[in-house]
Amino acid sequence: MFLKKPAKKTVYDLMVDPASPECLVEFLKWFLAPAVTRNSLMTQLGKQVPLLYATYEGKRVKCLMASRFDDIGINEDLNVSGGYTLRVNVGQLTNFSTTP
């Protein structure tokens, strides 16, 4: 008898899951949108890249990008404006918020 592994949630699953924190959903929508859409939102509507912080292995981290491959680029330096140091699966992050 084989045991089925539970299906892990993808970034797309999290975007439509009502239990997902709003800050995570907005972050994922931003980074999974086509670049031309993001650029238009920034230049024409003055929108800014959403801030997202999470906990990874007991430490607070700043989330700096998301990919359609279910990973998030993170950095332990909470003041950094760009440049992630590690890419982790979204399922490894918890305690999402817009503040450190």
Image (cartoon, rainbow, N blue to C red):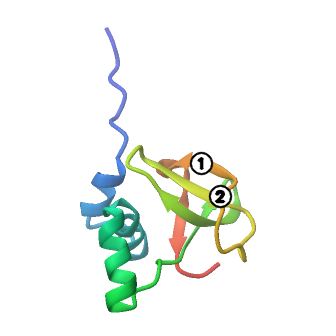
Q: Residue 83: give x, y in percent of width and height.
A: 66, 62
Residue at numbered disc 2 = 84
The 10 Å Cα crowd at callout 2, few under 14, some 14 to 19, many 20 or more, is some
SS at circle 2: loop
SS at circle 1: strand
Q: Residue 37: give x, y in percent of width and height.
A: 29, 71
The 10 Å Cα crowd at callout 1, few under 14, some 14 to 19, many 20 or more, is some
- Toward the top, the furthest residue is 1
Q: Is residue 41 above or below residue 20?
A: below
Q: Quadrant of residue 21?
A: bottom left
Q: CA distance from mark 2 to mark 1?
A: 7 Å
Q: Residue 13: give x, y in percent of width and height.
A: 28, 53
Q: Are marks 2 and 1 in contact (CB under 8 Å)?
A: yes
Q: Quadrant of residue 41?
A: bottom left
Left or right of 28? Residue 54 is: right
Q: Residue at x 35, y 60 (%)?
A: 32
Q: Residue at x 68, y 61 (%)?
A: 75
Quarter placement of the N terminus: top left
Q: Residue 56: give x, y in percent of width and height.
A: 64, 56
Q: Quadrant of residue 58?
A: bottom right
> Residue flagged by tag 1: what amino acid is it?
Arg
Residue at numbered disc 1 = 87
